[in-house]
Each structure stands twice: as C-alpha cells, then as structure tokens.
Image (tube, rainbow, N blue to C red):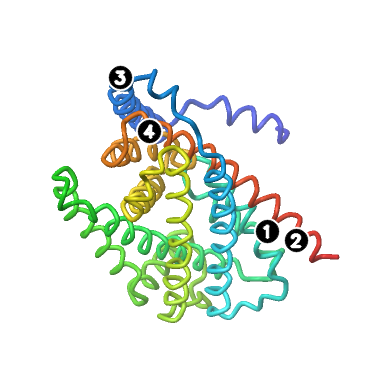
Amino acid sequence: MSAEERSVAVAAEPPTRASWLRRAITWAFYAAVAVVLIVYVARIDFASLASIRIGWHYLALALVAGLGQRLLIPLVWVLMLRSLGVKVRRYASFNFVYAKAWLGRYVPGKVAMVAARVYFADELGASRSVIAISSVAEIGAYLLVTGAVSLLGVASIAGSNDAIAPYLPLTYGFIAALAVLLWPPIFNGLMRLLFKLFRRPTADMPMVTARTLAWAVAGFLVVSVMTGVLAVLLAASVDPVAFDHAFFVWGAYSLASVLGMAFVFTPSGIGAREAIQLPLFALVVSPEAAVAIALVSRVAELAADALFYGVSALWSRLAAR
C-alpha cells in the first residue's frame, strides 16, 4: 500500500471515542459562550453602540504598545535559555522563531506554540529538551505573574462592587497552586515524569533553577506593565473614562488573557476572552462601550500579531546579512 493509500485509509477510519468526546466538549464550550454573549448582547442599545466614536490616536498608540509587548516576551525566553546554558549567538533568529511559534496560539489545543519552538530548535543550535522545558516554564511564569496582576487589578474595585468579592478566593487559590507547581523541585519532578511518559531520556534533562524562574518572573512583570498600557489605551479609544479605572482595566484584560489560555479548545481564546471582558468592562463603562472595547481589542490583537511577525521576519533577514 502506498503512502497516499495509507493516508486515505487512515482518514476513512471512524472517529475514536476520545475524538468524539473532544468534539462534544468543544461544542458544549462554544454553546455556553454563545449563551453568555447572546444574553449580554440582548441588553445592548444598538443605537448607542452605533454612536460610539473610536479615538484613533489612542488606538495607534495601543498598537505600538502591543508590538513592544510582543517584542519583550522573546527576550524573557532568551534570558531563561541563557540561564539553562544555551549560547545565544544571533538574538534575531531566536526572536523570529518565537514570532513564528507565536502564531500557534491560533491553533486549538495551545500546544502548537511549544511544539513549533521545539520543531525550530535545530535552527537555533539548541537542545530540543531545553527548548521544551524552558517554554513550559515560561508559560507557567507568565500565568503566575499575569494571574497575580489580574487578581490585584480586578480586586481594586471589590470594595465598591459586590459582584467581584465572591470570585477572589478562587483566584487566590489559582495563584497559590501555580506558585507551588513552579517551585523548582516540584517543577523539575513534573518535567521528569512527562519525559518518562513520552519515553524521552531523562539523564541529560536540564534542570530549572530558581535563577531561571527569577528571570522569567522579573521579565514578565515588565511585560505585564506593557500589557496594562495596551489594555488602557484600547479601552480609552472607546471611552476615555477607562483612564479613571486604569488598574481595574489592566486586571480585567489580564484575567481574560489568562482564562483564554485555559480554554484549550479555542484558537487564541476567541469567544472565551470576550465572554470574560464584557461583564468586567461593563462594571466601569456602559454595556455598549464594553462591546466596542471587546471588538476593538480583538482586531487590535490580530493587527499586533501581524506586526510582530512582520517586524521579526525583517529583523532576522537584516541580521543574517
């Protein structure tokens, strides 16, 4: 049987129980998101929504902030790689590999980002094990820092809004659990277990140290500040009152990013992020403005990702010359 015939035969095989379960969970998730969005949109005054004017100067600044934020994230990853013994000879190459892998966030499953970096590891002259472990540690540090910021930001109006208070203990628990999992002895033990499950040799597996995680946490604190600038500018492009609640907007935007990653079946958190942003932003702006902010944010994120890839590709090409 030829390779083409084998591929046709595999494609013709009936779906397994696991694939059916995955589809069912995916559809159930999207149905729940659709219900949330429909209920919310049903309360919208579309005449008021149509009258909203976009502040293009704020939106342009937000795109610059979004590009800056994305260019900082590969730097955090490279600092982690250096602490794990990787020699970084051409930083532009590492940045471009990250930019290519970044597009994997639009693939459902969320593993494509890490898998792409591991795939391109040969271009970097780095061990695939180091790339994989540093990427997992980086994502964990991002969730820890961004989750903590979102907790503090959203909690900033808890005293004036009773709708927030019941959810704070859950967020505290999430941050505490993530901090424990990132503690080097536990993190390295989990990575060793994963290597054994995937039948990868563990003898030369790199060990994440406190220094590696310190670089990651410090770097993502700076990235988080850039995220806050991006969030406030995006919200202010719809309603300048966002400046009066800057810390809350920063926290709400960050929370939507964290929970959007948690919904692994959605490409780039589409639907999930909007379902989280709408009720949160509506606590400080009108429901119509909250819808506009969510829509503007999604389009701006797409534009910033395109800019990130384009700038990184050009930079890598110029550096190669």
Contact? badges 1 and 3 (CB < 8 Å): no
Q: Tell me which numbered mark, 3 or 4, is placed earlier along the sequence.
A: 3
Q: Label 4: how many residues lie within 10 Å, few (<14), some (14-19) or many (20+)? A: many
Residue drawn at 72 percent across, 63 percent down:
123
- Indicate the position of residue 272 as horizontal and vertical percent values: 38, 37
Q: Label 1 amino acid?
A: Phe
Looking at the rendered structure, the kind of residue marked 4 is: Ala
The answer to which quarter of the image holds residue 288 is top left
Q: Which residue is mark 1?
A: 96
Mark 3 sits on what residue? 42
* Name of the residue lying farthest toward the right: 321
Q: Is residue 73 left or right of residue 259?
A: right
Using the image, tell me which numbered label, if any, was put on residue 316: 2
For discs 1 and 4, the disc positioned in front in the rendered view:
4
Between the C-alphas of marks 1 and 4, the distance is 36 Å
Q: Position of residue 198 (x, y in %)?
A: 47, 59
The amino acid sitting under disc 3 is Ala
Quickly name the residue at label 4: 289
Kindly identify the residue that appears in the image at 30 percent across and 68 percent down.
179
Q: Are marks 2 and 1 in contact (CB under 8 Å)?
A: yes
Are dots 3 and 2 in contact, CB under 8 Å?
no
Residue 122, placed above or below residue 40: below
51 or 25, nearer to the observer: 51
